[in-house]
Image (cartoon, rainbow, N blue to C red):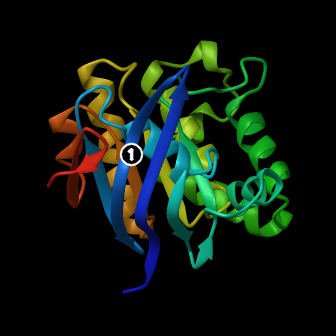
Amino acid sequence: MKTILKTVDLKMTYQLGKVSVNALRGINLEVKEGEFVAIMGPSGCGKSTLLHILGAMLKPSSGQVLIDGEDISKMNEAARTEVRRRKIGFVFQKFNLFPTLTTEGNIKLAENIRRNGASKTSAKRDEILKLLNLEKRLHHKPIEMSGGEQQRVAIARALVSSPAIILADEPTGNLDSENSQIVLNMLQKLNQQLGQTIIMITHNSEAAAVAQQTVYMKDGQIVQ
């Protein structure tokens, strides 16, 4: 099975005045195409820093990050932005939908940013909307939808470009238990039916249970 993401001795050090903070202390992680991986750990363990580096938003202090064969660890900001556009879909805790746009508008905006062919993205959009049970919410704005529905729109937006990886940062953090389970079931369905690779950051063991494997972090290291 193809390796879609790999980190080699990944380290990240922040300088806070005269104090050096080692946020990541040599992370070695390998994710195969089509896997669903949950990353768990207490607050301050380095989960968010790792996610930002895997998402090409931060440059590590040292080590390698390979996404779909491309080493992003030495890239400049412009090159990393291009990788984010082509290879990565993000799902955030706070949804980050444009409030003045409908479901269709939010998804089309993501399509335009990624500049895919219209016919291809139209077919992909219809498939995703059906899989996420959003067909009847196509012309609704975020304020007219529940939190669970908004998060499913955010997932649909992340998927339209057929990214190599979906990075989900506490995707159920702002949801009640019922909507959390719906969103988790949807992510699991996308992984099982579309073969979508997903890496999910979570502190919730129930959320992690839907993943195929769980990676535990502590003090900037993978401990299990």
- Residues 221 and 113: in front is 221
The residue shown at (52%, 34%) is 14
Image quarter of the N terminus = bottom left
- Near-viewer residue (50 or 2): 50
Q: Is residue 202 above or below residue 19?
A: below
> In this rendering, is residue 92 above or below 191?
above
Residue on which disc 1 sits: 24
Mark 1 neighbour density, 10 Å: few (under 14) some (14–19) many (20 or more)? many
Which x, y percent locates residue 140? Answer: 66, 24
Residue lying at the far top of the rendered structure: 143
Q: Residue 85 lies in what quarter of the image?
A: bottom right
x then y, percent, for residue 44: 32, 28
The answer to whether residue 192 is seen in the rendering is no
Residue at left offset 73%, top offset 35%: 106
Question: For numbered disc 1, what is the local secondary structure?
Answer: strand
In depth, the one of 212 and 119 nearer the eye is: 212
Question: Is the residue 7 above or below the residue 178 in the image?
Answer: below
Amino acid type at image mark 1 = Leu
Furthest toward the front, the residue is: 18
Residue 114 lies, in percent from the top left, at 79, 56
Q: Quadrant of the C terminus?
A: bottom left
